[in-house]
Every structure is written in C-alpha cells, then in structure tokens.
Image (spheres, grey):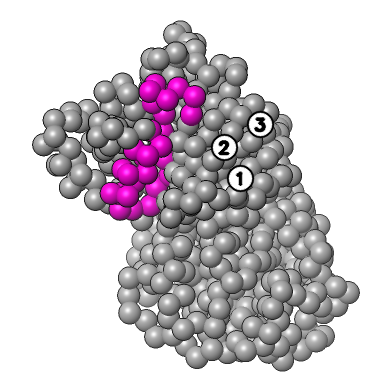
Amino acid sequence: MCGIIGAIAQRPVEPILIEGLRRLEYRGYDSAGLAVIDGSELHRQRAVGKVEQLAQRLAEAPLAGHLGIAHTRWATHGKPSEANAHPHLSEDRVAVVHNGIIENYAELREQLTQKGYHFASDTDTEVIAHQIMEEMRQGLQLLDAVRSATAKFKGAYALGVISPTCPDRLIAVRQGSPLVIGLGISEHFIASDIQALLPVTQRFIYLENGDLAEVCGDTLRILDAQGSPVDRPVHQSGLSAGSADRGQFRHFMLKEIHEQPQAVAETLEGRLGTDAVLDGILGPGSEELLARVRSVQILACGTSYHAGLVASLWIEGLLGLPCRVEVASEFRYRRHAVMPDCLLVTISQSGETADTLAALRRAKTEGYLGSVSVCNVPESSLVRESDLVLMTHAGPEIGVASTKAFTTQLVALLLFTLSLGRHQGLDATLAASLVDHLRALPKMLERALELDAPIEQLSTLLADKHNALFLGRGGHYPIALEGALKLKEISYIHAEAYPAGELKHGPLALVDADMPVIVVAPNNRLLEKLKSNLQEVRARGGELLVFTDDPEALGADAHTHVLSVPSIDDWLSPIIHTIPLQLLAYHTAVLKGTDVDQPRNLAKSVTVE
Ligand code: AGP
C-alpha cells in the first residue's frame, strides 16, 4: 500500500529519499512527504499528489540533513491531503512514517487528547508519533520509547522513526508489514520494498515480525519480539537499479506485458525434465506430502484468484482431485468444512496481501495436510509462513495492474499440477506432452505479442464506451474475468465477465450497440456452443471482439472483429489468450488518457484488510 524509505548517511539524504519514493510510488500515490534532521532541528516537507509535486517543492527549498525518513501514501484513515500525508510529527521532536493500520488508534487518540496532545490529521499514524513522544516524556530514550509505545499498538504495521533528540539513529519496526534494512558502507537504509534501495545497495536484511532495529551509520542493532538482540541473515539481491526502469516502453505495464516470454522461461527454468516435471520442485519433503493429497483448497485475491480458478480446472480435469477456490477475504471470515487430506495453496504476487496472509494463518489451525505458496517475492510473509513454496520468477512487477505475475502464476500452477499428478496417476504420455507444450510456451507468447498493433487499432472501438461484457467458457472463463478486471482497473470502463452459456440467463438484456462484447473463443469442444452464444449477441446488434485460434470458424463481419491468436494445446490455451486481453485493456486506457501504471484508488500490494 504505502511506501517507506529512510536513510542515515554521511552524505545528504534528501536525493536518496526522493529517488526511493519515485521507485516506491507504485505502492501508493495520493501524497508524499519527507522529514530530515539537520543538526538539532527537524524539517518536514509534504505534498498532495505524485512524488513529483514533492520533488518540485524540495527543488525550491531543499532540505539538508544526513538522517531522514520519507513516505508515499495510499489513504486508509483520512482523505488524501497535505495534513494527512506522512511523516507525522509530535512537537517537532518525533517524526514517524507508517505502513499498515493501528486498529486501536481511536482509543489511544482519546487517551492522548486527554493528556493534552493536539491532533493535526485524521490518520491513525499521528497516534504513533504522540505515543512515542509520551513515552519520551516519561524519561525513555528514543529506542525504548518506541518499544514501549509499540507494546500498546494493535494491528499490522511497519514504522520508521527519527528524533532530533537522537540525531545519529533511525528506528525501524516491523509488525506484520514488510520492512527491510539496506546495508551500505558507513550508511544504512530502511524501506518497505527493496526496489527503493537498489540505487544505493544490493545487500539487505529482512526484518522478522516483532523486530525493532536501531540503525546508525556504522552500526546496526536488531532486537526480536522479546527484546533480545538477534542476528538476521544478510541477503545479496540479484536485482539492479535498472530492473525498475521502463526502458523503451511508454509504461511499466506495456514493458511487463512484453516481458512475459522471458518471465515464463525463467519460471520454467530448472523445473522441466525431458518428459516430466523434475522431482522436488516444491522443495525438500514435498514429494512425500504430495503423495498424501486427496483434495486441494486454493486461496487468493484479485488476479491471483483468477489464476487459482484456472488451476482448479487443471487439478480436477487432469487429476480428478476435488479442488475448491475461494477469495481469501471471504474464506478468512466464514465457517468452512475442510476436505479430507486437503492441501492448501495460496497464490500471491506480492506475498504480503493481508487477506491472503490472514486466510493462510487461519487455515493453518484447521487440519490441512500442509500449505504451498505460489509467490513472486522471496522473503515475503506468505513464503516464510508456508510449508512449501513454488516461486514464480516474473521479476519485479511495477505496474499496479498485474500482467506477467499472472501468466507466471499460471505456469507455476501447471507445474504444480504436474508435480501432484506424478502421485495421482496422471498418464505419463499426457504429462510428457504438457511438458513439451510448456517448453514451447515462451515462443508462443512471443507470437501472441505480435497482436500488439492490431489490438491497438481495435481498442478504438472500446475507448468511448462505458461498459463492456467479456465471455469465455471452461478454462477461458477465468481469463475473461481477468480481462474484465484489467479493463476496469486501468481504463475505468465498467466490465463484467460471464461464462458464455450464462448470457441468455440475464446479461443478454444489456446487449445493444453500446455494449461491446469481448469473447475468448479457442477452437475446442465448446466452440460450437460458443458460436451460438455469439449469434445471440449479433441478433441484438452488439459489437463483437473475438480472440480465437480458429478465425475461419468465427466469420468476421462489419460488427464482428476477429483476431487470430496462436494455436496451442487446449490445457495451455488460457495462458496464451491472456495476452490479447492485457493488450486490449492497455491500449484502451492509453486512448482514454488514464494513469496506466498507477490507476486511481489502487495500490500494488494490499497490505491492509
Ligand atoms: C491485479 O491487477 C490487481 N492489482 C489485484 O487484483 C491483485 O492481483 C490483488 O490485490 C492480489 O495481489 P497479490 O497477488 O499480491 O496477492
């Protein structure tokens, strides 16, 4: 959601913080702010809108200082405004940046108000600043004051705290929201995402939940949840600062769409044998666990949920194993029956989605055989809390609308299905042919990307519309759902997806010349049925945009626009058919002039409920 960065260095930190904010902006972008300590004084600058607004203000009035914290915000408590932007201060003696939510903030705010503290914002964060100040008033030094204050907070959060009373240290806290420490030479950094720090370091320590770190220029001390000093391992990241650049592309989203052949190739790397998925791709002990599985429960949110829907069709269709899929935000709050010998699978690009994490934590107490996470971020909470992990290797995804993370999730989930299939009687010849098709997939994706220019033209049919309907059948229905979500997210056109057979049960009433109908129509055993559904649309004067690997069978006319998608085995066809829908959403959004990479009201990683 929001982004945090902090730095303590021998050089001025303002440029480091601003560059870090730019790189974090995909996480939240309604306001931004920065505070530095210069000598014994605390200075702050904030601005509503993008980081660029803040950078302009700082260009007019630069802030000196070798210690600072900064934040880019995605509003939870209080509307986007300068007063609600972080850092929040208490009496110019404490400055705080915060990700997450303090659930008991109302009660603490009441207590602090009675003690005479004045609140200048509607945020829960200001409670943190005043509570730390209150602890300092009781005689505690900054580190102990933060420790004592956090003991009173309920919720999931990450904090960066500075005070001119301790001008040589930065305090960092991780309690449920991600936070890393970046290690430099006589300089150290903190951030909610390593992307922010890649220009200054590639060496990171991932804080654990409950950790509190005292970060100085030359030294670093980490205390665990019990207050005992701990050593956490140092990780060398393979990422470089350039991995978050747009390169020749106009938007990160377009770059990430075009990176899919490579991302899929990397997700397959080292996992395919000649005619089977390699043993143990889910890690040590995984084969024994997979052998005991009799059912599968998948949990995820948003796009990752759509990947789960496709996977459930693979697991039931190829293996005959019962497989349920549910959005994590519902599952976590309802009573549910656990199927016999059931393996829990969570799917998340970020590995920090609050609902998915909470659902995993709850499920772990409910008698599942074990948990597998399909995730793109090593060291994320989901990865660390799952028994087994199958990483997607999509690389950093910056565009808020998920693209390469989705197709790599699909690939990882098919690998997972094949791994499970080794123990569930999946026919070896069928498995070998799917392995062959997977190996060919990156090349097929490259061919699908050649549709970029024709789809750009087609998008003119959508850009002036207010609604759109997406249709698909079987494994292509989740792809229709994903296409509709992409269009909604970035073009703000209202879009719905239906299994095509459902059209006549209601949504057909909406179809007229102003309701474009986008159809995913692979040449499979359901094509004839789908063609009847298209006739239903044609008969009502609807405009059809059809993506198919059998264009002849569909018959283009003045109101039926047919685009040919490369033909591939039907089990993998949902992956290929994803590409044109991503491109359609992208080009429509560009025509509409929306903020493609940072669409309104959304954030990349949803770490609050
Ligand atoms: C995708 O385009 C969305 N931005 C969103 O639905 C996302 O997939 C969802 O929030 C889940 O995120 P996760 O994969 O990081 O858990």
Comparing labels 3 and 2, the label whose residue is closer to the camera: 2
Q: Which residue is mark 2?
A: 220
Q: Quadrant of the N terminus?
A: top left
Task: Classify mark 2 as within 8 Å of ligand 1 or not, answering yes or no.
Answer: no
* Residue 148, magenta (yes or no): yes
Q: Which residues are magenta?
A: 142-169
Direction from residue 399 to residue 117 in the image, left or right: left
Residue 241 or residue 425, whichever sits in front: 241
Do labels 2 and 1 touch, CB within 8 Å? yes
Alpha carbon of mark 3 to alpha carbon of mark 1: how far? Answer: 11 Å
Q: Which residue is mark 1?
A: 205
Instruction: Residue at 46% x, 84% y: name it.
Output: 367
**Mark 2 Cα shell of 10 Å, populated few (<14), some (14-19), many (≥20):** some
Q: Which residue is mark 3?
A: 184
Where is residue 57? Give x, y as percent: 43, 14
Inspect the image, locate mark 1, and give the three-letter code of the amino acid beneath it: Ile
**Mark 3 Cα shell of 10 Å, populated few (<14), some (14-19), many (≥20):** some
Instruction: Residue at 68% x, 53% y: name it.
Output: 394
Q: Is residue 202 visible?
A: yes
Which of the two discs, 3 and 1, labels the residue nearer the N terminus?
3
In the figure, 292 relative to 375: above or below? below
In the figure, 522 relative to 144: above or below? below
Inspect the image, locate mark 3, and give the three-letter code of the amino acid beneath it: Gly
Instruction: Residue at 20% x, 44% y: name it.
Output: 108
* Residue 246, magenta (yes or no): no
Alpha carbon of mark 3 to alpha carbon of mark 2: how far? Answer: 11 Å
Quarter of the image for residue 185 reads top right
Q: Secondary structure at mark 2?
A: strand
